[in-house]
Amino acid sequence: MRDLDYLRLLSRDFPTARAAGAEIINLRAICGLPKGTEYFFSDLHGESEAFIYLMRSSSGIVRAKIDETFGSLLSEKDQLDLANLIYYPREILSKPENLEKITPEWQKITINRLIQICKVVSSKYTRSKVRKKMPKDFAYAIDELLHLDRNDIDKKLYTQNIMDAIVDNGMANDFIIALSELIRSLTIDRLHIIGDIFDRGPHADIIMNELMAFHDVDIEWGNHDADWMGAACGNPACIANVLRIATSYNSFDVLEDGYGINLRPLSMYAEEYYKDDPCDCFKTHIFDQNVSDSVNPDLAAKMCKAISIIMLKEEGALIKRHPEYHLEDRLLLNHINFEKGTVEIDGKEYPMKDMHFPSIDPKDPYKLTESEQKLMDTLVYSFTHSQLLKKHIYFLFTNGSMYRIVNNNLLYHGCIPMTEDGQFMMLHTSEGDFSGKSLMDYFNRKAVDAYFLNGDVDPVGKLYATDLFWYMWCGPMSPLFGKDKISTFEHIFVEDKITHDEKMNPYYSFSKEEAVADRIMEEFSVDPSTGHIVNGHVPVKTKLGESPIKANGKLFIIDGGISKAYHSRTGIAGYTLIYNSHHIALAEHKDFKKGSENTPVIKIVELTKHRTFASRGYTSRRSDDMISSQAFCLWKA
């Protein structure tokens, strides 16, 4: 009966045996093509310029293809100029200093060079797939030039006329842009984002726009993404935390210019309540200057303090609402001794660095003042009614999940929570006990409930699921967080660094062992003999000799610190994992400086035993390179 259900669905696309047979011919032919190249990025953290460069350069692969195609025929400078043209064609062609060199002869030479590169990068795809990626206006001309036989004398004049017509009609620059975009599209067949698109960097919104424009992308949520997802669903604790991070990292553009979040009420509140407070514990980390919304650092510190206090109150209310979280030890506001200026943490007393709390009632420290409640109501409205944020969060849901299995590779952001003795940690809930894969599935279901469940029909279920986004952000058993606690309070208010320590989940020690990596893959029905685990979340400190490759090559941790905030700790600017039909490679990023030589260093880390063809690849949704066994069933039927 299930086969019949499949066949009825397939009959819509293949109504006759002839139609099914034609599809089988196409797919059998595709089996002989190499698998497309997959790119894996992690922990982008709003670094839009660096990410767009890595996307447009295919993390150095475009540069390698230029060298492979032209070698000694072009100088190093000419190769670099051609590469930059492919990355940023509109900017380069419109620069006043370049106008003199953009002659008809230069345009023809450039188009010919781009066609040669395009031939190389399109060779592993069907002509139909390449045509689908072409801009409609130029598809005919590009297709003809791509498949030109230079030995065919009869077509020499024909192709020359195509080139002359492009230049004579003033379309050469547009044609160069179209070819550059096609090359970039063909070098990355599929894109995997292993979490943490948001926070710290200047423009997560621009990254999301770039991802939405890409032809084939999936996202494995990170804890920072979950925080923003919760904020978009109206979770006050998540909203306050998003704003705390944004004000701390000077990310005002992404809030106001990007998502249209009105911060005026917060700035007015901060000015009123903290007017004479230097807010020394809340000084902004300035890695990027705002373009649209420059905020005075002193005001930014006041805003950060104001929303941080509100955040601690909102988190406290949420923790009290959920005793099953077992996070009573995080209720630190009621452990402050307001007379002595100290706080008790884990039974020990520590001096507080700041004791100016005009909005905290020592007798009821978690109660919002009337002004704070009014401010939060305004901010909740602003987050839940931002049209662009809604669009981006919807994309995170439709293209994202807690984990994904692609081509026998298991992708997730943080960890599979484990106990000290190496077993999968068990989360006890009213719906049952969950560990390993079932734990990931549980959080995935609840995230979907938080976004899609009708609150009028099930207000309790909606609130529970929405609250869980905060736990996904920082809960001890959250697979996205992977630590025993988040020590935000201690980092802000306590000098003693021993209180700042956040103990990593035992996963991070055990997963380095090949046998444990195998067990995790088996839990998710991934074949350990050929499979890999890819995750991020924890920056790899390359400058201290750490390697992103663990468990005898079966685990890749690809958070190398693309965020500027991590560069001093990691020594590099992140990794891209690249998986093509021949090998798996790691691209080690440089600190991005626009206009400089930023090509990553690419190292092959694993060769495939045999070249991988499209027939051996598995994707989680249908594409041009997916084998339709159901079509074969229809043909036989």
Image (cartoon, rainbow, N blue to C red):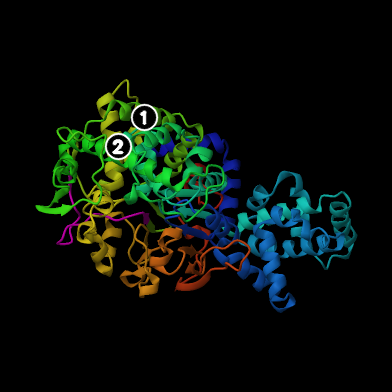
Residue identified by numbered label 1 = 375
Q: Could you say whether the residue bearing mark 1 is in a helix, strand or loop?
A: helix
Mark 1 vs mark 2, CA separation in Å? 10 Å
Question: Which residue occupies the foreground of this view, 219 or 636?
Answer: 219
Q: Is residue 360 above or below residue 97?
A: above
> Residue 149: where, in percent of width, then height?
79, 64
Which of the two discs, 1 and 2, labels the residue nearer the N terminus? 2
> Residue 209: where, in percent of width, then height?
54, 44
| Three-letter code, disc 2 | Ile
Give the side of residue 212 with respect to residue 381, left or right: right
- What segment carries the magenta color? 411-428
Question: Which residue occupies the foreground of this view, 238 or 174?
Answer: 238
Q: Which residue lies furthest to the top in this view?
A: 456
Q: Find residue 499 and report its image quarter.
A: bottom left
Answer whether residue 301 is visible to the viewer in this image. Answer: yes
Indicate yes or no whether the magenta region holds residue 157.
no
For image coordinates 23% across by 45% down, the residue present is: 355
Give the side of residue 271 with respect to residue 309, left or right: right
> Residue 14: where, in percent of width, then height?
56, 38
Residue identified by numbered label 2 = 310
For image coordinates 49% across by 35% down, the residue present is: 391
Q: Could you say whether the residue bearing mark 2 is in a helix, strand or loop?
A: helix
Crowd tier of the residue under label 1, counting other residues whose Cα lies within 10 Å: few below 14, some 14–19, many 20 or above:
some
Question: CB under 8 Å between callouts 1 and 2?
Answer: yes
